[in-house]
Amino acid sequence: MNLVRAPKTPKGNRTRERILAEARHVIVEQGFDALAMRDLAKRCDVQLGNLQYYFATRDSVAMAVIAAEAEADISEVRVAMETHDDPDAQLAAVVRRFFVRWRGESGLIFATLIYLCMHKPEFLELKKRIYRAFYESLESLIRSLDTEVTPVELRQRVALITAIMDGSVAQSTGGSRTFVDAVVATVTGVAHGRSGPGL
């Protein structure tokens, strides 16, 4: 999901990472509308022309910040799968990790994506690519829970699980341990095909 050219030098990589970190900070603290290329260059202590070598526009910076956040989410799925041997424990760990991430700064980054999707088609395309990659990361986990699942059922389950996780994070009472446990149980049921429409 890499959206920008990779710098050719370690210094270039550090500069790019600093730009993304500062842009992420602005988006989280002040919102997308506060992200301005000239201000970002000043925050990063680089010339505007140098900043534009890495990211031509504020949209391209925002897209890279959002893509990096999505890549971190997918990495969380991998970590959960490597940390636990039991597929049910892996799935529970994924749900719990995302609750923490999505109720924090990561949730603000994705709220920005949803807002921008309504106004800019390139962000809608980015959202589609992010969800496709996220679904693919969950598919092998769900398949390990139910080896008989058909490809169509698998896609439905993954989409439903993602919708449950997305929606439950937005609930005002969603942070309690009891609520998170209920979400884990619901997601596990859907993953096994024990609940949900058509399952």
Image: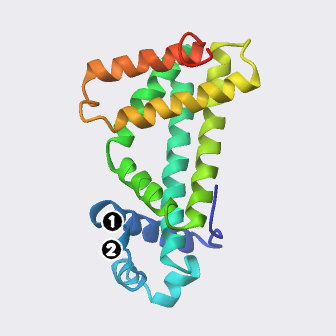
Q: Give the secondary structure at mark 1.
A: loop
Instruction: Where is residue 35? Give x, y as percent.
Output: 37, 74
Above or below: residue 190 compared with residue 165: above
Amino acid identity at mark 2: Ala
Q: Which residue is mark 2?
A: 34
Residue 31, label in figure: 1
Residue at point 65%, 73% (across, down): 8
Distance of label 2 from label 1 (alpha carbons): 6 Å
Seen in the image, is 164 located left or right of residue 130?
left
Q: Badge 1: few (under 14), some or many (20 or more) residues near its Cα, within 10 Å?
A: some
Report if residue 85 is visible in the image. Answer: no
Amino acid identity at mark 1: Gly
Instruction: Where is residue 66? Give x, y as percent.
Output: 49, 57
Residue at point 52%, 79% (across, down): 57
Instruction: Where is residue 115? Give x, y as percent.
Output: 43, 59
Residue at point 51%, 72% (across, down): 59
Above or below: residue 127 compared with residue 8: above
Task: Check if mark 2's residue and mark 1's residue have beta carbons within 8 Å.
Answer: yes
Q: Badge 2: few (under 14), some or many (20 or more) residues near its Cα, within 10 Å?
A: few
